[in-house]
Amino acid sequence: MLRLFFAFHLLVFTLFACQGGYESCKQKIIDSQTIIDQSLYIPINKTQRLVYSTQLPEAKVLKADPFLALYLVQDRENFPYPFRMNINVPSGYASVNAECATEGIIKQEQIGLNHLAVFNEAVSTPSLLLNSCCSFEGIVTPRGIITKEYIENFLNSAKPEYADIGIRVQDRNATLYVAYADPFWEENPFMRGDILLRLDNQKIKDAASFMKTVLFAKPGILHTVKLQRDHQVLEVSVRSKKRYGGGFLSDTFLEQKGIYFDENLAITKLSTGDAYHGLKLGDKLVSVNGKNVNNQQEIMKNMPHTNKFTILLFQRDDFQFFIRVK
């Protein structure tokens, strides 16, 4: 009887939300205390919340995705009307917070971890991407929108992780090409500039779908990739590995060596147990293979194409020093 009571009230609340449109969604965000400072605490059932936060939440963490700054935590408030993931094709949606609802469309899909989806209107962050029935479509962050597929992948994964095949890709003139190839990947079959044609015998639609296929597969999967290199068409095989960088983590290929950077290229994390080659937190990367670097993309750009030594110049206070990484 009690279960029927709650089911009835949930139905009434949902119908009210659809009638009230985004005004009722705003009220639901307020009532559930979903937005706290610059973090989101989204009730997804009566005992758990999905958290978006760049800081460790002050709650019992059940699992975490550091790449997208997502956490699943226990909910002590037990909000009775959690947000439901929309299972239908959206007929329209808005970026909604406690103050406003901005209707619009996603003009660019999320491409992997490093390129979040882009809304066609200016929005306040953080916010929820909702339809008019308050069903959940995504998380609006200052970097862009984390879309529903990535959130579902996180919630459905016992141990959230992503797979990597040793490349970073970009769309160019309706083709997908390799922008950077991992030099630390043993016998990496890809080269910078390769045009990607087919993945696992399926025609590649775009960078967004390609990255979801690669990232969401468990590490250890053997993939076949048909590509064009210069004027030659090749088919290569590559077994995926665990991904270490991307999204809200740095992505320079050095993360697999345990070295993580902030936006100013200062070291924020060393995960190799002992300090790697005497590095310390706060050491700033100055150059890669003799070329000055100002951002993470320039680090990858100046890496060698093959598995050779990479020479890194760091600065600590007024002292500069080299290390060699292979």
Image (tube, rainbow, N blue to C red):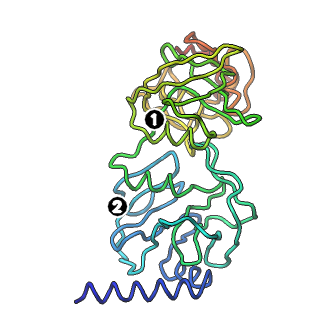
Q: Residues within 10 Å of mark 2 (few under 14, many from 20)?
A: few
Residue pointed to by mark 2? 60
Name the side, left or right, on which 286 lies relative to 190.
right
Name the side, left or right, on which 224 lies relative to 118.
left
116 or 196: nearer the viewer: 196
Q: Determine which of the numbered discs, if any, sits on residue 122 in the image.
A: none
Query: In the image, which is nearer the foreground, mark 1 or mark 2?
Result: 1
Q: Quadrant of residue 75?
A: bottom left
Q: Indicate the quadrant containing the N terminus: top left, top right, bottom left or bottom right.
A: bottom left
Under mark 2, the amino acid is Lys
Residue 264: image x %, image y %?
Answer: 68, 38
Residue pointed to by mark 1? 163
Name the side, left or right, on which 11 lies relative to 298.
left
Distance in Å between CA atoms under marks 1 and 2: 27 Å
Under mark 1, the amino acid is Ala
Mark 1 or mark 2: whose residue is earlier in sequence: 2
Identify the residue shown where x is 61% and y is 70%.
91
Identify the residue shown where x is 70% and y is 36%.
171
Identify the residue shown where x is 70% and y is 59%.
119
Q: Quadrant of residue 168?
A: top right
Residue 307: image x %, image y %?
Answer: 55, 12
Residue 240's place in the image compared with 95, above or below, is above
Do residues under tags 1 and 2 come within 8 Å of each other at their CB atoms?
Answer: no
138 or 90: nearer the viewer: 90
